[in-house]
Every structure is written in C-alpha cells, then in structure tokens.
Amino acid sequence: MEKIYRYIAGHATPQSEALAWVEKQTHIRTNHARMLSGAVQGQVMRMIVQMCGARDILELGTFTGYSAICLGAAMPADGHLDTLEINDELEDLILEGFERAGLSERIDLHIGDCKETLRRFAGEGRMYDLVYMDANKREYCEYYDLIFDMVRPGGLILADNVLWDGKVCQDPLPQDKQTLGIARFNDMIKEDRRVESVILPLRDGLNLIRKK
Ligand SMILES: C[S@@+](CC[C@H](N)C(=O)[O-])C[C@H]1O[C@@H](n2cnc3c(N)ncnc32)[C@H](O)[C@@H]1O
C-alpha cells in the first residue's frame, strides 16, 4: 500500500513551495502530522475546485492550513475561503502559511468552535459553492445540518475520513464515538434524497456529496 501511495504521489503534480513549508512545519511544530490531508488528496481537491469552478469555499477544521491552501490556490481570482479552527495555538503557523502561499487576502481564519461560527454565518446569510468537512468526526451530522442551507444548489460537500481506517465496515461496529459518528453520517447521507453522493476510497475515504 505504502509503495503504491509513493508511486501515485510521485506521478501527481508536485506540491507548491508553500505547501512543502506547511508540511515540514507541521512535523516540526505539532504532534499530529498524520492529520494533514497530504499531497495526493490535496491535488485531488485542487482539481475538484477547478472543475466545479467553486468561488466561495468553507472549510471546517483548518489544522495547520494545508488543505485550506490547496483549496484556496485553486479558486478563481475573485474567490474567497472561510476556514474554521478551534485550536488557537495553531493561528500563527496557519497565517504564515497563507502569507507564503499568497492567499492572505482571500482566506479568512475563524478561531473558535465551528458550530458556533456556523450559526453566526447562517444568520449573516453566507452561501458557499463547496464545503470541506474535516473537524471533529463525532460531530459530522451536526455540521451537515448546520451547513446544508448555506450550500448553493449544485454545490459540493466533501467529508473527509469517512472510512475511518476501515472501522465503519467492521462487524460488529466498534462502539467508540468517532466510528459511530462517522457511520451515522454516512448512513444519513445515503438516506438524504436532497443529495447524490459517492465515497471515494482516497486516503481515509472522502464522501463526495452534491446538493441537487
Ligand atoms: C484532521 S484536522 C484538519 C486537517 C486539515 N483540514 C488538513 O487537511 O490539513 C482536524 C482539525 O479540526 C479541528 N477541530 C476539531 N473540532 C473542532 C471544532 N468543533 N471546531 C473547529 N475546529 C475543530 C482540530 O483542532 C483539528 O485541527
């Protein structure tokens, strides 16, 4: 698996200097580098943004800013991205990465619990073409309910880690809150007639959801 991943990564468009800097700093300055979406998934997300022409983008779960830079770099010149992160200790690293990527003017970082930020955004009438969901896995169903009306018809919702290391299809289903949260989310999407969806087996699973 590792060998195949290296082959795929070696045959994708290389990541930018800014992304390489964020990746390196994430390893040096945090203990959670495995949370990075990484070069291959980042390139897939860039291409999705370009293919659907998303101009207004929302991200839940910035971490060190890697995926925000991937999404932001693919937006058109008048595009804008709101990214939401609960951990204020990451703020300096995130903002330096945005600066290095030349995206400071087009990405706004909102520190705080994303559920509260989303309630405020809904009151402000914000609308998005694409939402990337990558915060607390226990809360995906809540996030979905909070963002749904802010997604334009035809817009996309990308939910990350929806295979949760294969745990979602183990029998019996592991009873930890993260596995249960993701399994409940995948079931909820399958039943929701307002959208069409497919889980891409990319890294830890990306649920690609299109609002009709
Ligand atoms: C998997 S990481 C995000 C990785 C990032 N999207 C990337 O690909 O580089 C999840 C992030 O969500 C943040 N998070 C968790 N719960 C949150 C919440 N309720 N509101 C905002 N951010 C949250 C965590 O602090 C963590 O930085």
Image (spheres, grey):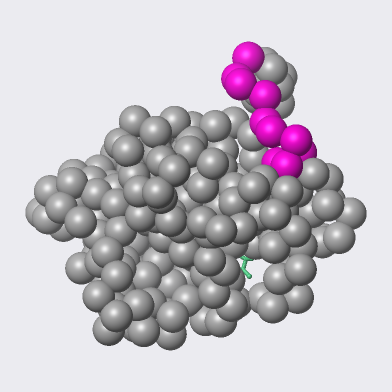
The answer to whether residue 49 is above or below residue 155 is: above
Residue in the image at 70% along x and 21% along y: 6
The residue lying at 24 percent from left, 49 percent from top is: 155
Q: Is residue 100 above or below residue 9?
A: below
Tell me which corner region of the image, top left, top right, bottom left or bottom right, holds residue 19: top right
Membership of 199 in magenta stretch:
no
Give whichever of 99, 123 is nearer the camera.
Answer: 99
* Residue lying at 40% horizontally and 49% vertically, measured from the top left: 78
Q: Is 79 displayed left or right of 164 in the figure?
A: left
The residue nearer to you, when weighing 211 against 203, is 211
Point out the stretch of residues depicted in magenta: 11-20
Residue 130: % across, % down: 34, 51
Please, is residue 154 above or below residue 45 in the view? below
Relative horizontal placement of residue 178, taking residue 141 as reference (left or right): right
| Image location of residue 61, percent across then percent down | 55, 64
Looking at the rendering, in which quadrant would you find the N terminus?
Answer: top right
Tell me which image quadrant ligand 1 sits in: bottom right
Main SS category, magenta section: loop
Residue 54: image location, x then y, percent:
34, 44
**Membership of 13 in magenta stretch:** yes
For image coordinates 40% across by 66% down, the residue present is 140
Percent of width and height locating residue 66: 64, 49
Using the image, determine if residue 62 lies above or below residue 2: below
The residue at the far right in this view is: 28
Residue 103 shows up from this direction: yes
